[in-house]
Amino acid sequence: MPVLDFQAYDLSYQKEADEGYYDEQGIWHEGTDEWVSVGKCNAQQSGGYQVISLPDGREEHYSFTIYVHNPRLREFKYGEKLMLRSMRGMEDIELTVKGFSRHYNLCKIYA
């Protein structure tokens, strides 16, 4: 009998690149973005038409609710890029943050 895995994904966010640099020959090199791992999480597709209200009054549709069981998680801002990777390596899902809420023992990210 299979066991439910409540932490079936690995969550990462995209850290913006620092500015580029010149090497010894004077050639310009662009900075590169990198993915920073947050840790294990659970994600649930929002089956249907889910809407979140933004602080400026607009409404956005989101397709995933991500649950991170770490109340000290850094706060994610609107528009940040996220990557959900299944622990078995079967799928990678790239998402954009639409909302963030902190609760007593977990944080929710709407993407």
Image (tube, rainbow, N blue to C red):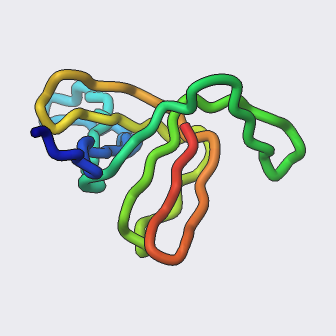
Q: Residue furthest front?
A: 1
Q: Is residue 105 left or right of residue 2?
A: right
The residue shown at (57%, 43%) is 110
Q: From what the image shows, is residue 53 above or below residue 28?
A: below
Q: Residue at the location (69% across, 32% down)?
A: 50
Residue 31 in the image: x percent, y percent?
31, 35
Seen as rendered, the residue at the extreme right is 57
Whether residue 65 sits left or right of residue 55 in the image: it is left
- Residue 32, how many percent across, how many down? 29, 33
Q: Nearer the viewer, residue 31 or 66?
A: 66
**Occupied quadrant, residue 15:** top left
Total count of labels: 0
- Tell me residue 49's x, y (percent): 70, 25
**Which quadrant: the N terminus?**
top left
Residue 47 as seen in the image, left or right of residue 58: left
Is any atom of residue 26 visible in this view?
Answer: yes
At a point 37% along the width and 40% down the height, the residue shown is 14
**Vertical placement of residue 88 versus 101, above or below:** above
